[in-house]
């Protein structure tokens, strides 16, 4: 009987024989491996060359606030308690919370309004648009792109919004095939968002003033009238401050610039993946061919 050392040597020898057999199989099928690798590499490189380039423009924002004193924060601190008693809400320092402004930015109404104001439908659906005749290629209304479809495309594939929870910094990204348009849209969205939030704050303050004037006419108490006058003054000042603040909801820390390099396709990565995938397919094809040949030979031997 063999001892453990002899068994180990035989097993090791069998492993070496198996490895040599595998190598022989691969070497015999080297042309197939090479062909699969070459074909996959050519396909990958071809795709990388013809794939549409996509650029991304980013604008870095910081929620506008005046926590260090003055402006709307001072008004809110001075008249906040009095306003609460009268049932009036003073606007916040930054034109609403940053979360509110972000939700407005991502809302369907805001996005649709921006698309419509800038006539982006022909750009977003350029393949369906005839630039020479300035008309859709398909005259049927039900076959033409809609604002809802444009909104979905913009929200899912073009615009991205991320917030750093620690610093509060907001990054707005726009991905598009034209780098100039990507930068233009990113900066344009911020401008429109600030204008939207400013208009909302002014409208809220105006409604509050109208409400206070109505309450003023209904009371004859001097102390209450004086309080209402002070609230009207505060709301009037908040409207004035809102109108002079261009960057009302967000301050632009770093505006979007025209990107120079596309974010996709990543041509070098696609080429490497194509090379690796082709090699793997080639190796599998060689072993599969070898297994089929052995199986056919075994069936032929049994039949004879």
Image (tube, helix red, strand yellow):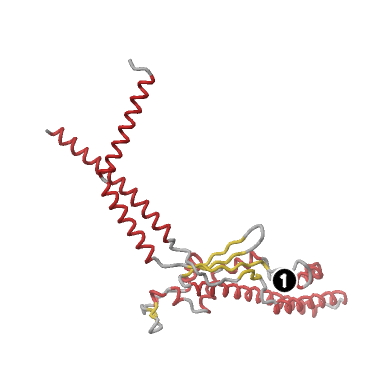
Crowding around mark 1 (Cα neighbors within 10 Å: few <14, some 14 to 19, many 20+) is: many
Q: Residue furthest right?
A: 222
Q: Could you say where residue 24 lies in the image, as x and y percent from the top left?
A: 27, 39
Asked if residue 142 can be seen in this view, the reply is no
Residue at image location 78% in from the left, 77% down from the top: 232
Residue at image location 35% in from the left, 24% down from the top: 9
Residue at image location 31% in from the left, 33% down from the top: 18
Q: Could you say where residue 2 lies in the image, as x and y percent from the top left?
A: 34, 17
Asked if residue 129 can be seen in this view, the reply is yes
Query: Where is mark 1, residue-wise?
Result: 91
Q: Residue furthest top?
A: 1
> Residue 233, located in which quarter of the rendered image?
bottom right
Q: Could you say where residue 40 lies in the image, as x and y percent from the top left?
A: 33, 55
Examine the rendered structure and indicate whether residue 185 appears above or below residue 24. Answer: below
Query: Going by the image, does 33 lie left or right of 273?
Result: left
Which quarter shows the C terminus? top left
Q: Nearer the viewer, residue 265 or 201?
A: 265
Q: Nearer the viewer, residue 204 or 169?
A: 169
Query: Going by the image, does 177 lie left or right of 212?
Result: left
Q: Could you say where residue 289 lies in the image, as x and y percent from the top left?
A: 24, 44
Q: How many marks?
A: 1
Query: Going by the image, does 207 lie left or right of 113?
Result: right
> Residue 228, located in which quarter of the rendered image?
bottom right
Examine the rendered structure and indicate whether residue 198 appears above or below residue 294. Answer: below
């Amino acid at each position: 009987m063999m001892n453990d050392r002899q068994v180990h040597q035989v097993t090791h020898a069998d492993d070496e024989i198996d490895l040599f057999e595998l190598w022989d199989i691969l070497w015999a099928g080297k042309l197939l491996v090479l062909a699969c690798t070459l074909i996959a590499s050519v396909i990958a490189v071809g795709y990388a060359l013809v794939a549409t380039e996509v650029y991304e423009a980013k604008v870095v924002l910081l929620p506008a606030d005046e926590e260090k004193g003055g402006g709307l924060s001072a008004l809110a601190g001075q008249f906040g308690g009095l306003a609460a008693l009268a049932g009036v809400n003073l606007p916040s320092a930054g034109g609403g919370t940053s979360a509110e402004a972000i939700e407005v930015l991502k809302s369907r109404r805001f996005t649709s309004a921006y698309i419509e104001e800038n006539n982006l439908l022909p750009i977003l659906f350029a393949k369906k648009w005839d630039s020479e005749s300035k008309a859709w290629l398909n005259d049927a209304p039900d076959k033409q792109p809609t604002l809802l479809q444009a909104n979905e495309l913009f929200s899912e594939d073009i615009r991205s919004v991320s917030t750093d929870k620690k610093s509060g910094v907001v990054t707005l990204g726009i991905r598009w095939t034209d780098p100039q348009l990507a930068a233009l849209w990113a900066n344009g969205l911020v401008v429109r968002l600030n204008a939207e939030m400013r208009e909302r704050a002014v409208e809220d303050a105006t409604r509050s003033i109208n409400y206070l004037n109505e309450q003023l006419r209904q009371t004859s108490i001097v102390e209450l009238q004086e309080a209402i006058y002070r609230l009207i003054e505060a709301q009037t000042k908040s409207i004035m401050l809102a109108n002079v603040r261009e960057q009302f909801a967000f301050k632009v820390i770093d505006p979007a610039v025209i990107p120079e390099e596309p974010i996709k396709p990543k041509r070098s990565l696609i080429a490497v993946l194509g090379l690796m995938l082709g090699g793997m397919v080639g190796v599998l094809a060689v072993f599969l061919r070898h297994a089929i040949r052995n199986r056919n030979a075994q069936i032929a031997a049994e039949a004879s």
